[in-house]
Image (cartoon, rainbow, N blue to C red):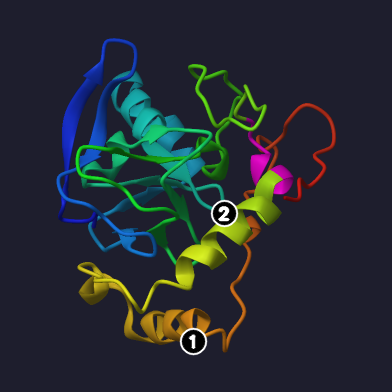
């Protein structure tokens, strides 16, 4: 379930469509929660699909830590990549805004967190930190940096409105409250890494620390 103050809009000819905030969304806001309507497919299932269906699943899904494809029913599947994303995923099955998102601004995430199969070079952008390629093992490379950004965002979790709270499991919600208070440590985004055969980069990934 994606944040209610978002919609799909045409961005430009190169990117196509994206997800844009219709109102301001403060840092620390949960922007997406996985729910029961999202579909999960094994690699074998995806391989068995005809070309048309397989192309859709591979284009609009992310892979979880088990290597399964998760196909989201809502318009989060139209979120575009950025090396300077507005949102990041967490091991709790939700994404959080890591900075304030203004009305009319695009919601983005870093595709390096999604267990992509092949590396690719996205459009050049400011704030890339010197990166020009998204790699399958970026979770190994950048987990410390992303963990710091997520932890900073969670410090605001209890201070901002959470329209998606009802979609978050009660036990997880309680754990998030403890993390926000500093009473429990935040699990690393690195837990999302699928370490199977296709999750490889160029050489051995060294963690990047901010």
Snapshot quadrant of residue 166: bottom left
Label 2 packing within 10 angstroms: few (<14), some (14-19), many (20+): few
183 or 51: nearer the viewer = 183
Question: Residue 97's x, y, as percent?
Answer: 39, 55
Question: Residue 92's x, y, as percent?
Answer: 46, 68
* Residue range corresponding to the magenta coloring: 135-141
Is disc 2 placed on a helix, strand or loop? Answer: loop
Q: Nearer the viewer, mark 1 or mark 2?
A: 1
Q: Which residue is mark 1?
A: 178
Q: What residue appears at the point 44 percent right and 79 percent down from the top-left corner?
A: 176
Q: Is the residue 132 above or below the residue 176 in the image?
A: above
In reply to whether residue 137 is colored magenta, the answer given is yes
Disc 1, disc 2: CB below 8 Å? no
Q: What residue appears at the point 47 percent right and 79 percent down from the top-left corner?
A: 180
Q: Which residue is mark 2?
A: 66
Q: Is the residue 91 above or below the residue 101 in the image?
A: below
Which quadrant: the N terminus? bottom left
* Residue 195 can be seen, yes or no: no
The answer for how far apart the CA atoms under marks 1 and 2 are is 27 Å
* Residue 177 can be seen, yes or no: yes
Specify the label residue 108 is tagged with: none
């Amino acid at each position: 379930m994606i944040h209610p103050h978002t919609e799909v809009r045409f961005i430009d000819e190169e990117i196509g469509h994206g997800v844009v905030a219709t109102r301001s969304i403060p840092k620390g806001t949960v922007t997406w929660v996985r729910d029961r309507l999202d579909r999960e497919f094994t690699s074998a299932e995806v391989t068995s699909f005809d070309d048309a269906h397989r192309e859709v699943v591979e284009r609009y899904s992310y892979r979880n830590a088990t290597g399964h494809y998760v196909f989201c029913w809502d318009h989060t599947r139209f979120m575009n990549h950025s090396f300077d994303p507005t949102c990041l995923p967490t091991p709790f099955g939700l994404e959080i805004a890591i900075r304030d998102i203004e009305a009319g601004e695009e919601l983005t995430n870093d595709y390096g967190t999604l267990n992509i199969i092949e590396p690719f070079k996205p459009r050049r952008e400011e704030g890339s930190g010197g990166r020009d390629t998204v790699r399958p093992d970026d979770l190994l490379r950048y987990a410390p940096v992303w963990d710091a950004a997520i932890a900073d965002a969670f410090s605001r979790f209890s201070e901002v409105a959470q329209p998606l709270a009802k979609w978050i499991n009660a036990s997880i919600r309680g754990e998030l409250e403890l993390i926000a208070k500093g009473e429990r440590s935040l699990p690393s985004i690195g837990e999302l890494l699928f370490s199977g055969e296709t999750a490889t980069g160029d050489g051995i990934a060294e963690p990047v620390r901010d």
